[in-house]
Amino acid sequence: MQKILCASGILFLFCIVLFIKDAEAIPVFARKYKTTCATCHAPFPKLSAFGEAFRLNGEKIPGGADEIYVKQEPLSLGAEAYKQIFPNSIWPSSLSEAPPVSFNVIGDVLVDPTGTHTNSTAFNFQTEIDIHSAGTFGDHLSYWGEVIFAPSPNGPSGSVNSETGTVTTDGAWLMYQDILPCWFGTNHFNLKAGDLGHLEISLPNIRWDNTYQATPYLYQSQLNLGTEPGFEINGFGRSWKYAVGITKSDFGNSERDYHAQLDFKIGGLGFDGSGGQTEEGGLKTSPAGYWRDDSIMFGGFWYRSYDTLTNPDATTSVNAFDRLGGDIRWNCENFSLAGGFTRGLRNDFILPSMFSSSFGDLLPPNTLTPAEMALFPTLLINENIWTAEAQYFVYPWLVPYARFELVNATNAPNLNQDRVILGVTALVVANVRLNFEGVYYFQNQPLNVPGVIPADVQSNLVDVRLQFAF
């Protein structure tokens, strides 16, 4: 028996080593600059201060030094001399010779220690497979795109998760960087078109696209903060950045949504890449402190959309749905602490308490008859959501973290929630990461309601996640 166990253990370790070896290929920007993932991530997919400056600068090394560090020779689309005879020529551009594509793969093992779900353990491989592309077309145009493949959440009621098909989502944007710098200043006026919301429709320093945690933030899921196609103007300086935009309605009607975001920074590496530990903007920062950015960041956002409600008398009315909030993050050596407040204000129908979900006691009005709607008044719902989180780098590859979230809603008591999330993330190598995370609800744990609520809503769970990028 001991020989069998020993052989099984050796085989298991051998499989892990093989798996990791295959995953050591590096993503698109790491290939372009011949550098490690830790140059821009702390750890991946969370951006470091240098990674944020790189993103804001249109996917380029800040400070005008991009050409110095590019190791892959770009394919020229026109000679530089064409700029001198424009408009009697096509403005020159460039492409990456190698396809600028990278992959992100996520797998989860979900365990329900409370017995709430019918299936207490689910092996979800793969939870998600992403295909990403990003880069530049010359000096002023940058782009980003992704296609995400994920299992359908509409599985049997009561299960932790199930795979009954594949859901595919996609998104892309194109941005023209640094418009009329002689008028507005360098990097102060940029125009973006495409899918917006990953970065802008959220708290600037506590956002889902910039974390290694496995559980989405309550304020983003509770207030339906997603992505929509539209246009945006943004800009940044050493200690500030802003964004304002207009998008398609998140309720699918003919209205338009509006958003704005403003963020400030004291200390650390500037949003424009100035300051910090090295003149190179962070490329030569010590591997032992790649996450360091001693600073204070604070900002806020506002987002307005319009929902069309059907009244009991069969007439319709348009109601504004406002979300606004602010946050602050303090980074000091190996420690980072953040807190945020978000408010959602809207009119909606209130339904019986038996309907409970991650979106509370709300059901689309078009599923009710006029007589049924007359029983449920339209009330003003005010959701106040508090978020606090902390992380600490024990080693460059080991980061424990904690998060607490509280939802307090008027006129909709089943929207009230509070939960704690405890976890640790560990880098196996620079582009392979493990997460161990537990979620516990103190109040109103989301439950499954057959035929109404998807089977994989968040509840008291332990999540073991493997993620790798190449």
Image (spheres, helix red, strand yellow):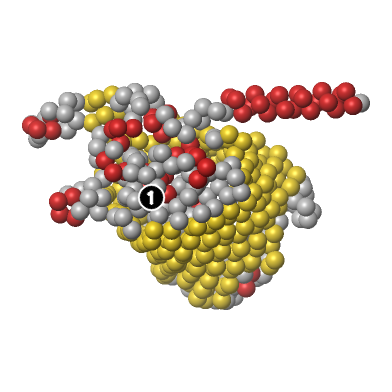
- Give percent across and percent down for residue 221: 54, 57
Crowding at mark 1 (Cα within 10 Å: few <14, some 14-19, many 20+): some
Location of mark 1 (residue)? 276
Q: Is residue 2 left or right of residue 61?
A: right
Q: Nearer the viewer, residue 68 or 189?
A: 68
Q: Nearer the viewer, residue 414 or 314?
A: 414
Q: Look at label 1 and name its amino acid.
A: Gly
- Give percent across and percent down for residue 247: 35, 55
Query: Residue at 42% of width from left, 44% of height from top?
Result: 51
Q: Is residue 12 visible?
A: yes
> Is residue 407 depicted above or below 217 in this figure?
below
Residue extending farthest to the right is 1
- Give percent across and percent down for residue 187: 26, 50
Secondary element at image label 1: loop
Query: Residue at 62% of width from left, 73% of height from top?
Result: 413
Q: Nearer the viewer, residue 330 or 1?
A: 330
> Is residue 70 depicted above or below 449 in this figure?
above
Q: Is residue 445 left or right of residue 279?
A: right
- Total tally of numbered discs in the picture: 1
- Give percent across and percent down for residue 382: 51, 73
Query: Residue at 24% of width from left, 25% of height from top?
Result: 76
Q: Nearer the viewer, residue 181 or 448?
A: 181
Q: Is residue 258 visible?
A: no
Query: Residue at 39% of width from left, 58% of height from top?
Result: 267
The quarter of the image holding the N terminus is top right
